[in-house]
């Protein structure tokens, strides 16, 4: 009886993991992107789980940068031209403020928790 339950539980657990995995992937895929448009980062603040790779894409005709507010010690992109991308994986929890060094009024925050 116990063995029968265990045998049935394995594929159920696998199915649950698969569903959870797909759900987690779908959930992480959309918000792990930040768009730079009209001299602004969007969305901001953006909350993600530890280990999430965030990709910024510049859709403006102007170059922009993505630089952590600690002077670029955590992450620092080169100047991004139109459609250029920059990615950084946030492994540790925290609130990460960043800005564009060309237009310092452009600011954003990534919250990792
Ligand atoms: Cu800029």
Image (cartoon, rainbow, N blue to C red):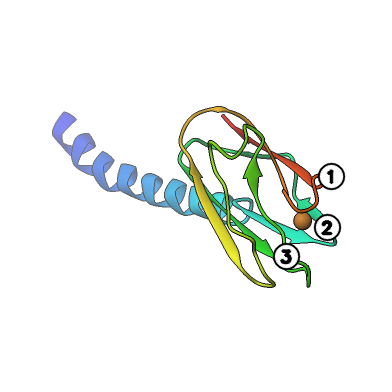
Q: Quadrant of ligand 1?
A: bottom right
Residue 45 image point, x, y percent: 73, 39
Which element is circle 3 on? loop
Looking at marks 2 and 1 on the same chain, the residue that comes earlier in the sequence is marked by 2
Say left or right for 15 vs 50.
left
Return the mark for residue 39: 2
Looking at marks 1 and 3 on the same chain, the residue that comes earlier in the sequence is marked by 3
Which is nearer the eye, 97 or 53?
A: 97
Residue 6 image point, x, y percent: 20, 35
Q: Which-is-in-front pick, marks 3 and 2? A: 3
Say left or right for 59 vs 15.
right
Residue position for label 3: 63
Residue position for label 1: 105
Return the mark for residue 97: none
Residue 84 image point, x, y percent: 61, 68
Using the image, determine if residue 91 lies above or below residue 28. above
Residue 58 image point, x, y percent: 69, 64
Query: Is label 2 within 8 A of ligand 1 (CB to nearest ligand atom)?
Result: yes
Label 2 with label 1: CB-CB less than 8 Å: yes
Using the image, determine if residue 70 lies above or below residue 55. above
Query: Is label 3 within 8 A of ligand 1 (CB to nearest ligand atom)?
Result: yes
């Amino acid at each position: 009886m116990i063995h029968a339950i265990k045998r049935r539980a394995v594929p159920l657990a696998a199915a649950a993991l698969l569903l959870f995995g797909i759900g987690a992937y779908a959930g992480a895929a959309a918000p792990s992107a930040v768009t730079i448009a009209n001299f602004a980062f969007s969305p901001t603040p953006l909350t993600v789980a530890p280990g999430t790779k965030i990709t910024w894409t510049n859709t403006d005709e102007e170059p922009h940068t993505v630089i952590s507010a600690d002077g670029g010690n955590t992450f620092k992109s080169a100047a991004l031209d139109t459609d250029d991308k920059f990615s950084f994986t946030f492994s540790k929890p925290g609130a990460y403020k960043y800005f564009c060094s060309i237009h310092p009024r452009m600011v954003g925050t990534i919250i990792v928790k």
